[in-house]
Image (cartoon, rainbow, N blue to C red):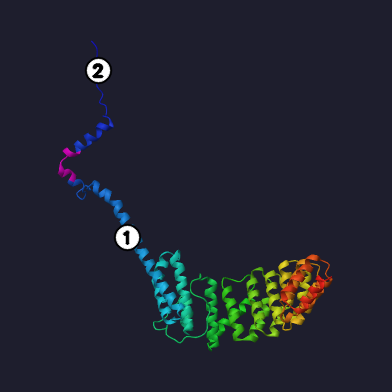
Amino acid sequence: MSPIPCRVPVAPPASRRRPLLWLALALAPASAGAQARPDVRPEPRPDADTVRAAPLATAGAALAELQTQLQAHAQADSLFREARSALVAEQYERAAVLFRLLREQLRDQVREREGRGANGQMLAYATYWEAFALNRLGNLHAAQAVLEGRDIPAGTVQGRPIGFSPKGGTPTAEVTPVDRQALQGRILAAQARAGDRVAEGRLLSSATTAATDPGCPSSAEDERIAALQGVAQLAPDTALRILVRVLRRREPCTQQLRRTAVFLLGASGRPDWGRELLPVLTGDPDLEVRKQAVLFAANALPEESAPALLELALTADDEGMRRAATRGLAHGRRPQDAARRLGQLYDQSANGGVRRDVLLLLADLPAKAGVEKLMAVVRTEKNVSLRRVAVEQLVRTKDPRALALLEEILNR
């Protein structure tokens, strides 16, 4: 007799377990579930329409935010154009009010975006040109406060126009940190000239650091450049001492300070200031500083600078320096002296480019002072190319002596 097979219960597959579980839960007493979890309620499942509407609601909110931003940008752009038009029309009071409104409108937006984007650039425009308009009205303290980011009380835009322009042109170019620092320095200079001792002290302190700070200048270098310009107008004797000390600096990153010092010394029109440029012609390590010194020294002291300029035109390695020195020899109050100096350079130089430049400069001298040297070159120069240039320049002068010489040459 065969044994009766024993059936071992086997768990149903997973596909059959879920219906059994749901059946058990459905047959369980409601009181048992309520006693165990009285605060639990089954969450309603969203229907298909709700699921489809969720992305549309998100997109709608984003579109509304974008439209708000575009509207705000359009309003700011319109306000900026209106303020700019007022400034171009020299309606400085109206321009200051409009730029202030624009600045206040953009300030919160820029703060949210941490200064990035077009709004940050427009805020820089508004700040600069509001200070510009206030400065034109004579409200120097208000203009200074705007540049420093301080609030100004209402009603400070009223004043009288003054003829001091920190930056010419219309408010269309990009406003850089250099512009802001230069405007701030010039406002300080105007305040100091008006008797403001605090502004005078700040100006002198900032200018002095241009000559005394060791190493490379900090980010305030642009302010010190403007301070040097202000001190040159406010206290010439003090400025001369500061500028000379600036020229003695040799750090590679102080070229711009030294170029400003060269400009202020050369543009002063004072011979004692111009003499400070003579050591710069050959002593400054920066080529551009030396070129600038050549230009201003030739204008300020044509006779005293002539030996150094002649040496540079003959021996300088840089072609640009040779040409700058050659042009410098053509400066002076007396054209005859300039012709003599250029003739000396022509006779001593072996450089064809330098000699050609001399011929061109001789023809441009006032009172036809270079005609005689050009005629001498036509008669004696063995270089055919240079002699041809001399003939061309003689024809350009339309001098009767030159025409007689050319007829003589043709009749040979």
Is residue 403 visible in the rendered structure shown here?
Answer: yes
Asked whether 239 or 127 is in front, the reply is 127
Residue 29 lies in magenta, yes or no? Answer: yes
Q: Amino acid at mark 1?
A: Ala
Q: Position of residue 375 (x, y in %)?
A: 80, 75
Question: Which residue in the structure is indicated by mark 1?
Answer: 64
Q: Residue at x 61, y 86 (%)?
A: 235
Nearer the N terminus, badge 2 or badge 1? 2
Q: Nearer the viewer, mark 2 or mark 1?
A: 1
How many discs mark residues in the rendered view?
2
Q: Residue at x 79, y 70 (%)?
A: 314
**Mark 1 surroundings: few (<14), some (14-19) or many (≥20) residues within 10 A:** few
Q: Residue at x 55, y 76 (%)?
A: 182
Magenta stretch, residue numbers: 25-33
Q: Is residue 182 left or right of residue 319?
A: left
Asked whether 9 or 129 is in front, the reply is 129
Asked whether 214 or 310 is in front, the reply is 310
Question: Which residue in the structure is indicated by mark 2?
Answer: 5
Q: Position of residue 279 (x, y in %)?
A: 74, 77
Is residue 341 visible in the rendered structure shown here?
Answer: no
Q: Amino acid at mark 2?
A: Pro
Q: Is residue 281 left or right of residue 113?
A: right
Q: Position of residue 241 (x, y in %)?
A: 67, 82
**Image quarter hosting the C terminus:** bottom right
The residue positioned farthest toward the top in the image shown: 1
The residue positioned farthest toward the front in the image shown: 411
Q: Is residue 94 left or right of residue 17?
A: right
Residue 401 lies in magenta, yes or no? Answer: no
